[in-house]
Amino acid sequence: MSAVLAVENLSVAFGPARPVERVSFHVNPRETLAIVGESGSGKSLTALSMMGLLPRNARASGQILIRTPQGRVDMLALPERRRRLLRGKQIAMVFQEPMTSLNPVHTIGRQIEETLIAHENLDRAARRARVLELMNLVRIPDAARRIDDYPHQLSGGMRQRVMIAMAVACRPRILIADEATTALDVTIQAQILQLLDNLRRELDVAVVLITHDLGVVSQWADRVVVMYAGLHVEEATPAQLFADPLHPYSHGLLAASPRNSEGLTYRDAPLAEIPGSIASARGEVGCPFRPRCPAAREVCGAVVPPPVPHRGDRLVACHFPGILTEEARLVPAFA
Amino acid sequence: MSLLSLENLATAYDTPHGRFRALEGVSFSVAQGETVGLVGESGCGKSTLGKTLMRLVPSDEGSIRLDGDEITAAQGRDLMPVRRKLQMIFQDPFASLNPRHSIRRILTGPLKIHGVTSRAERNRIAEEIVNRVGLPPDALDRYPHEFSGGQRQRIGIARALILRPQMIVCDEPVSALDLSIQAQIINLLAELKREYGLSYLFISHDLSVVRYFTDRVLVMYLGRIVESGPTREVWDNPRHPYTRALIDALPDAGNPREVAPLSGDLPGVQNLPGGCRFHPRCPHATDLCRKAEPLIPDNGDAHAFACHHPLPFMA
Amino acid sequence: MPADSTLHKALATSAARTAPQPPAAQPEWRHIHAPDARSATTAHLPPRQGYAELKLFLRNPNAIFGIVVLLAMALCALTAPLLFPRDPLAMVGRPFLWPGQDAAFPLGTDSMGRDVLAGLVHGARISLYVGVAATVLGLSVGIVVGALAGYFGGVTDRLLSRLIEIFQTLPSFVLVVVLVAILAPNATTITLSIAIVTWPTVARLTRAEFRSLRQNDFVTAARSLGFGHGHIIFREILPNALPPIIVTSSVMVAGAILMESALSFMGLGDPNVVSWGSMIGGGREMIRTAWYLTALPGLAIVVTVLALNLIGDGLNDALNPRFSEDRL
């Protein structure tokens, strides 16, 4: 398997609720895969599953296959102590909230060091040198002085850089960024995304970008997976997705985005809406998007469409893929 | 005559490092039926500006005029007529509604203190508003936790509307909502504007929403307005380097990946730069910029900017 | 699959519809808008569940036990004059009768021939009276002081916080003893003294809650709608600040009962009433021979305090933000 990470039929259940349902995708080395979805799509739980960090009362089934130098391992099948060996070393994660994901009572130097202590055998001096090297890698200015700063002395963007330094300290093969830039200002977001892309190339790491921002997807992702209500509904390259969204949800998302009304303002036309909300389908059978889909047919209420290949290497989970593109005037805002 | 006009407004508050001027020399006006956008990143003072003009936070200098009346120092009872004209919608749908109050109470409460004495009348108005914002009629007897984020935002809008204001300050009203719900709420705001003849001050960090939803836009950086003008013009021809950076920073397939549009970070409260507040991060900064702070000229509604070396105008 | 399966039918119908010509109803995104069009039919406001917190509380067996015991105490206290109309301090029988020795005195008599059971039942009155009254008083003062300090901040907060600190640094029980000794020892002065030492805890708690709740947008919204400070403090913020205060109050009642018992034990209680503490005090010299004289009132105190603590725990679980999703 050439993919560095493969998720096979992942399902996560909490009691009767199934927030993730038979999701499958893979991540190739050195690529950026974006997972797009809104709240309730299951994207964050998928990310946690990839790290083996699901809460105890979650029941996960399926496989999370990670390619390590020792061969393929299934994160879900491993006991906790083996998972710990993988985290940080093979797969790492950067979280959304820089305010709460750093420990406020430890210096940032110490926190970056912790990953090195856990996975590598270096003496104190060597560790400190590595920490400085990492801080320079993530472009924290004045690293020698800031290594002893506490998180509260840093801005949000700086804290995210520290988190990234911690994540890449042991050169993992896979880096998951779970809405890592959502809480940041747009100019800082641009810096951080650019940093992640640089690291991807310099350190030969595959990046999984979990986001709800379609713009981020269009600029930074090589491939994108769209999730809705726990299902994998579409997979394509950004260019393909934005030019020709096959799933009605993708179509609706793009239409609802204010970017797509290039030049038009609220005085000209309303934004295209997706009516209802993700809760509309609670307790119903069939495609979870059916209550909000303008093109729904009877079969949509009876059978959940599985993701199937369409037009080559694209995947879409819809009984009538591309049904909305024929009539909608979608002004392509993305190249 | 403009509905709201601010002149040289300044607000400061105490921090452990001394008095921090969160707003400095802010002047602009909003006309009847206009939507004015206010964009900027964290620390630019846009939220402080919203709260100052709502008279929730005292200002230190300058004047605020609503409908011709000076309201800068109004207090207590004098503020009641102001409250009827000027209302606010908040960002966080989960914190902006009192969890212990039913929706009916949230909506009829303001009516009561503003003189609608008949309970039947208050209920009638509440029912009408709830219907208008797109909620089912049995919503009135429920509590906030029973609603989703988008629905709570509708309740917040209903609450702002219930006194029939002339202007609503929208403080990041869709930032906490999913994209598909954002479109619903923005469309609702647009309809209500037409139907009730409202003006909006639309505060947001999301440039693409501001581009769609506003007639004029003000760009703020560290407490000052650095550029203002009709939205289309500012978008097509940004003159201030910061505005350019904001527009370029919007992630887009056509953007270059190699270099970010703006480097550096916001300075901390204790080391505000002298001269132009933007000069430490500005690629075109000169000695003049480090020494003298550029001021934004009063051009009325036309395109204005505060920069010694503005970007060239591209016809 | 069978030809008449619903799936087959569905597929057949849809196949017919997706025949060469484009789909029949051209989806018009732009005109489907609020009200949440399709969600109105799927009724996605969840069904009402009223009084969730009360139900949670009642599901807790410890809490039920506590409530039952407390109700029993309250019943005793209320019906004491009916059950035992004679003055419990009256000498009615032979001294040092053991429980069960004489049917007329089920729990025996003390060194002066007074009915122990009558004493216990009447003792409940003073305990509950002092416990509840002192707590109510302490809560009233504490909530007001804490609310004002937490809401207004600034100079008001600084002054009131100093006041709270002054009262908190004085050792509470010593202060109570001193106050009761200076003023004449009776139920009223005991209640007042206990309230004086317990209000600072409530004030601190209330202040902390107000400081954090004040930041919320619903408070800003109330101000921007024109509501005055009084309304905001008592009708907007206080209802949200109550849960930890309610939990604390049950423990405060227990504490007040203990303090009153301690005072009576030392002889500083109201001399005209029987209190569990005074009964223990009266029997303490005969612990080796007539230990039931201390054990029985002691047991009454233990059971009451335990019940109140269990109620407090139950309230905490029921009102704790982990369980109720609407608490900010």
Image: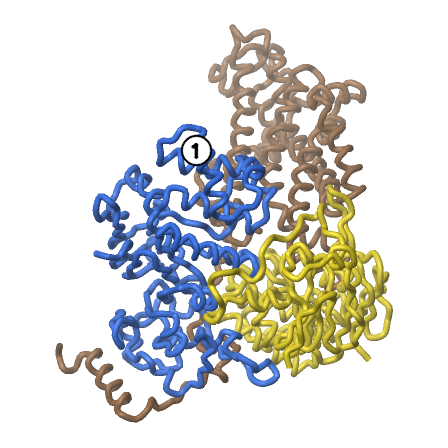
Chain colours: A blue, B yellow, C brown
Label 1 residue SS? helix
Residue farthest bottom in this picture: C21
Location of mark 1 (residue): A127
Q: Is residue B141 left or right of residue C202?
A: left
Q: Is residue A40 left or right of residue A301?
A: right
Q: Nearer the viewer, residue C13 or A157?
A: A157
Q: Quadrant of the C terminus of chain B?
A: bottom right
Occupied quadrant, residue C84: top right
Q: Give the residue at x 38% y 51%.
A: A175
Q: Nearer the viewer, residue A98 or C107?
A: A98
* Relative height, residue B117 to residue A114 (above, below): below
Q: Give the residue at x 39% y 54%.
A: A200
Residue B120 in sight from this viewpoint: no
Residue farthest front in this picture: B287
Q: Nearer the viewer, residue B197 or C99?
A: B197
What percent of the width, then of the height, locates residue C41?
A: 43, 76
What percent of the width, then of the height, locates residue B117?
A: 76, 70
What percent of the width, then of the height, locates residue A283?
A: 35, 66
- Amino acid type at mark 1: Arg
Q: Give the residue at x 65% y 83%.
A: B194
* Relative height, residue A204 to residue B78 (above, below): above
Residue C57 in sight from this viewpoint: yes
Q: Quadrant of the N terminus of chain B?
A: bottom right
Q: Chain of mark 1?
A: A
Q: Residues within 10 Å of mark 1 (few under 14, many from 20)?
A: many
Occupied quadrant, residue C27: bottom left
